[in-house]
Amino acid sequence: MAQAASKTCEICVSAYGSQYCLECEQYFCENCKTFHKRQKVTKNHQFQSSSDIIPEGKSKCKEHNEDVNFVCKTCNLAVCSSCVTGSHTGHAFSKLIDNITQMKTKNTKDLRSKVHEATQNIKTMEEGLKAFDVKVEGVVKTIIEEGTKIKAMVDTCVAQMIASVKDQSRNEKDKLAKIIADIKIDLKEGSDLEKKKYELDKTRNDGKLLQSLQKLTDDIAKLTIKPIPEFPNIQYTAKPVTDNDIKQLFGIFKISGVRTQYTGNREKELPKPKSDYEQDTKPKEEGKYLYRCNRCG
């Protein structure tokens, strides 16, 4: 068993053991490593830098107390040489170090693949988030433009209603003005008759006066004073307007919620905010729940 604290070449026992043979679990200098790789038996041995190695003693077989150097593929167990020719005869085998190397390589590859996938996912999600922000800004801009348009329509409607009120009221005022003018004419005629009466009061009582008084009586009878007309009235009845009535003037926006697939134990169901513009179309099913398996998803 190699000595963990030694960094001296265990072959020439003089030079610095800069290399470590994974199969032999020994430190080698550069020269001894070269000779080691030239031998047929050990030419396929794998080396690593001794600075990266923390060597440990080989595991022992519990049954034979020998070093465990092989893996029984049939039983998926680490075994020794005696096991190979004993209870595991006829099984498929591979070297323990080869299995370890393959698993390390596979783990490294898989881990790098998952890290790369996670990195790409983050990049895609960040880009998606930016795109979503752009869409949100677009919707906000559209809502503002629609609100401005509705405000302009309201202003136009208000102006038209005010103009209509003024036009109709002007017509009614013109009618009243004409009636007042006619009454003024009647009043002038009445004043003229009163003056004539005053002059006749000063005239001598004779037959001519009688004729003049008869004519004055006929003129007074013909004078008619127009009655006061029914005055026009104006009132405005406001319609009750609610927030919902205003919202009905606008379009409808809908945001599809985030839907996750599987994130293991970290998965959480995010509450979906309800919009005033979107009503639930499906009745809630009381007492029914869904669960997710943390292992298989």
Image (spheres, rainbow, N blue to C red):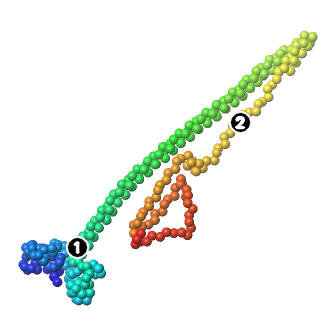
Of residue 175 and residue 20, the one placed in the foreground of this image is 20
- Residue 230: which quarter of the image? top right
**On the rendered structure, is 5 left or right of 173?**
left
Specify the amino acid type for callout 1. Thr
Q: Which residue is at a point 76% across and 30% down the rendered structure image?
A: 229
What distance separates the C-alpha of mark 2 from that of mark 1? Answer: 102 Å
Q: Which residue is at a point 58% across and 51% down the rendered structure image?
A: 244
**On the rendered structure, is 232 left or right of 81?**
right
Identify the residue under disc 2: 233
Whole-percent x and y of residue 291? 47, 70
Q: Secondary structure at mark 2?
A: loop
Specify the amino acid type for callout 2. Asn
Query: Against 148, is 20 above or below?
Result: below
Whole-percent x and y of residue 237? 67, 42
**On the rendered structure, is 111 left or right of 262?**
left
Identify the residue under disc 1: 101
- Residue 177: which quarter of the image? top right
Q: Is residue 61 visible?
A: no
Q: Which residue is at a point 53% across and 42% down the rendered structure image?
A: 150
Of residue 239 and residue 65, the one placed in the foreground of this image is 65
Circle nearer the N terminus (2, 1): 1
Q: Secondary structure at mark 1?
A: helix
**Quadrant housing the C terminus:** bottom left
Q: Which residue is at a point 51% across and 44% down the rendered structure image?
A: 147
